[in-house]
Image (tube, helix red, strand yellow):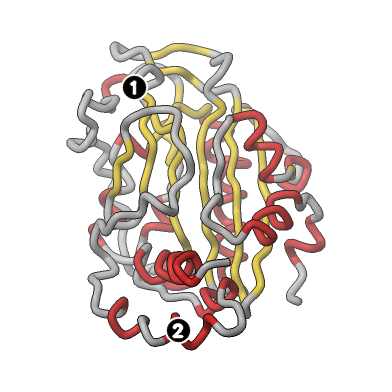
Amino acid sequence: MSAKKNFSCLIIFLLFTSCISKSAQAKLKGKNVNQVNKKISGVNKINISSKTSRAEYQPTSSYDQIISHNYFTLSYSEKDEQPEWVFYKVCVQNYNKLTRRTNDYREDPLVKTSSASPKDYKGSGYDMGHLAPAHAMAQNYKAMSESFYLSNISPQKASFNRGIWRSLENKVEFWSSFNDSIYVVAGPILDNPIDIIGKNKLSVPRAFYKTLISFKGGKAKGLAFIIPNKKSTKSIYTYVTSIDEVEQITGIDFYHYLDTAIQERVEANLDVKKWLSMK
């Protein structure tokens, strides 16, 4: 692997949020370590909470609207009036219980074709469901408020949004407590929608996915979930799959910036025990 790619893999850990993970060192190889470390002092001067370009690290997009807010990036589907995916990073510092939920649902001014509106959901029977969860955006007020842009929202059945989807969000919070950081991509399965709502004709997805890569102590692990957009009393582990499987269904390449060997290993995993292992 080239020194340039080693350095690129490290930069994402420093740019994406204010929680800096030790496991950026997972990408550093042998003789390149010293060379990369010499450049770290310059990287630290970058405003890591700004919308610095993340183009090298985001998933691939089927659309031409990539929007970067301060703490998450998304690909917006105009025809479905919702995100194709939302990409964000969490660590234990994200979950600040002192940051109050803002509930300021509103259109996203950065969507050039205009985003969906809260009016689209009125009387629809569907919740405005977060892709990057509000409680995972609790680093500060700005991050919390940005999570309520409709570009981060998708139509979800209430029993799904307030049930198993929330359970999965809470599990990610728990998993963040024993990892350096977790990279998350969440999104809807947009083909074969189960309904159309609102003046802007929002597609109601048949299912949602969440792909996860965790970093700890120089090691990376991966896991994914696909859950139907309906009530479920089953364990979230019933819906475990591999990141590779989600890529096949969606056509999205999620973690292409990783070293090839690491990417192939973590994206193939669907073993929950490996994901939960502290080793």
In this rendering, the answer to whether 258 lies above or below 230 is below
Disc 2/disc 1 C-alpha distance (Å): 43 Å
From the viewer's perspective, tell me whether residue 32 is left or right of residue 124: right
From the viewer's perspective, tell me whether residue 217 is left or right of residue 93: right
Helix, strand or loop at mark 1: loop
Q: Which numbered circle lies on residue 13?
A: none
Q: Give the residue number, with chain letter if any, for mark 1.
A: 78
Task: Tell which tag, 2 or 1, sits nearer the viewer.
Answer: 2
* Image coordinates for residue 178, horizontal then vertical, percent: 62, 74
- Which quarter of the rendering shows the N terminus? bottom right
Tell me the residue at 51%/43% (across/down). 186
Tell me the residue at 60%/61% (across/down). 259
Disc 1 marks a residue whose amino acid type is: Glu
From the viewer's perspective, tell me whether residue 188 is left or right of residue 75: right
Determine crowd level at label 2: few under 14, some 14-19, many 20+ residues with C-alpha closer than 10 A.
Answer: few
Q: Quadrant of residue 210?
A: top right
Which residue is at the front of the view, 119 or 208?
208
* Image coordinates for residue 98, horizontal then vertical, percent: 33, 69
Disc 2 marks a residue whose amino acid type is: Gln
Which residue is at the front of the view, 254 or 179?
254
Q: Give the residue number, with chain letter if any, for mark 2.
A: 35
Q: Quadrant of residue 219?
A: bottom right
Which residue is at the front of the view, 203 or 21?
21
Tell me the residue at 36%/66% (across/down). 17
- Which quarter of the rendering shows the C terminus? bottom right
